[in-house]
Amino acid sequence: MNGIRLFVAIVTFFSWMFSYAQLPEKISKPVPGSYCISTMEFKLYTMINTYRQRYDLPQIPLSKSLCFVASEHVKDLFFHHPDQGACNAHSWSAQGNWKAFCYPRDENKKNSVWDKPKELTPYKGKGFEIVYYANDAVVIDSVISFWKSMDYFNSFLMNSGKWQVTRWNAIGIGIHENYACVWFGELLDPEGEPSICGQEPQKTIIQPKEDAVKDVKKEPQKEVQQKKEVAKLQPAVTTDKAKTTEPKVSHENPVTGKEHYYIIVRGVGPVKDLQVFLDDLLAKGYKEASLVEKNGKIRVSIMEFQDRVLADRALEQVKKTWTDAWILKQ
């Protein structure tokens, strides 16, 4: 009797193993055939590669899969705002064809927000994301200037810091209203490049600069290079501010009946010193930077909002560079 039971158990075990081996692999979701990127998204992609080329870094191939993930995420951020409470801008809502994810709360060894490309597309590798938010519709020059001016974001663009030994082989761009994001991946995308909406598929062609400096170390020269870049984008701002003798100051209650929230990065001090600091911010591309007065005290603000929630989100990012930054309510 015991022999019969043993025989049945062995047969059952091998039958289960055979059935398990025959189970089909999980099929990845294909990127919709009608999917394409906007001309604005393609322009941001081109600007990132142009910036990298000035430091002799290789061009990153545009990825259809990562662009689709980026597109889905910026729309989710705009329409559903999953970045609330303990969840930051890398989070995903429960309002789409994906698993909801609160980052960093849900991040662990088994579940990672960086696996979203695997979940949504045929892309097999992880993707890593940077996000941009503005009060109004995204302006490409402001996006690239902001990312270049902050070490955390710039490390992705320039393969520096944590990403120094990493080689990006795929990049995806997404822009919707006042959100923009970029996803980076180490693996090539089997889906290839996306088409540009309304245009025939094309590849990026970046013309070499005659005055490109060779063998420049990225970190020591970063600040100098940023000032040169922004000077090309905003020559009037840089020149005019440098000549200003009477700084323009935002006073209390700038708009009657409306509250303003300023992110302060430099406290009370001599007006001339504050003006020099402000000029430096403007030169780095912070177009909203200004001097703010309250109770007879003048401070330097880097961003201005009329919504406290939006100001709090921006403060999280600003604190990565200015750890003592805080919000001033007018």
Image (cartoon, grey):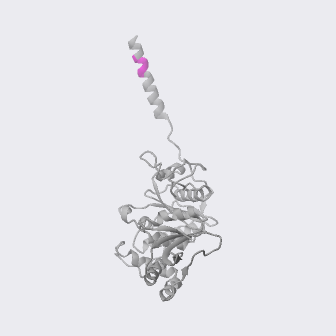
Apparent side of residue 314 relative to residue 152 in the rendered image (left or right): right
| Viewer-nearest residue: 296 or 79 | 296
Q: Is residue 3 visible?
A: yes
* Residue 5 found in image quarter: top left
Vertical position of residue 251 compared to residue 85: above or below: below
Vertical position of residue 289 compared to residue 134: above or below: below
| Viewer-nearest residue: 292 or 238 | 292
**Residue 124 position in % (x across, y down):** 47, 51
Which residue lies at the image location 58% right of the left edge and 70% below the top edge? 260
- Main structural element of the magenta stretch: helix, strand or loop? helix
Apparent side of residue 79 relative to residue 146 in the rendered image (left or right): right
Does the magenta segment cover residue 221? no
**Residue 188 position in % (x across, y down):** 46, 57
- Which image quadrant: the C terminus? bottom right
**Residue 153 position in % (x across, y down):** 45, 65
> Which residue occupies the extreme front position in the image?
295
Does the magenta segment cover residue 9? yes
Vertical position of residue 69 compared to residue 8: above or below: below
Highlighted range, magenta: 6-10
- Which image quadrant: the N terminus? top left
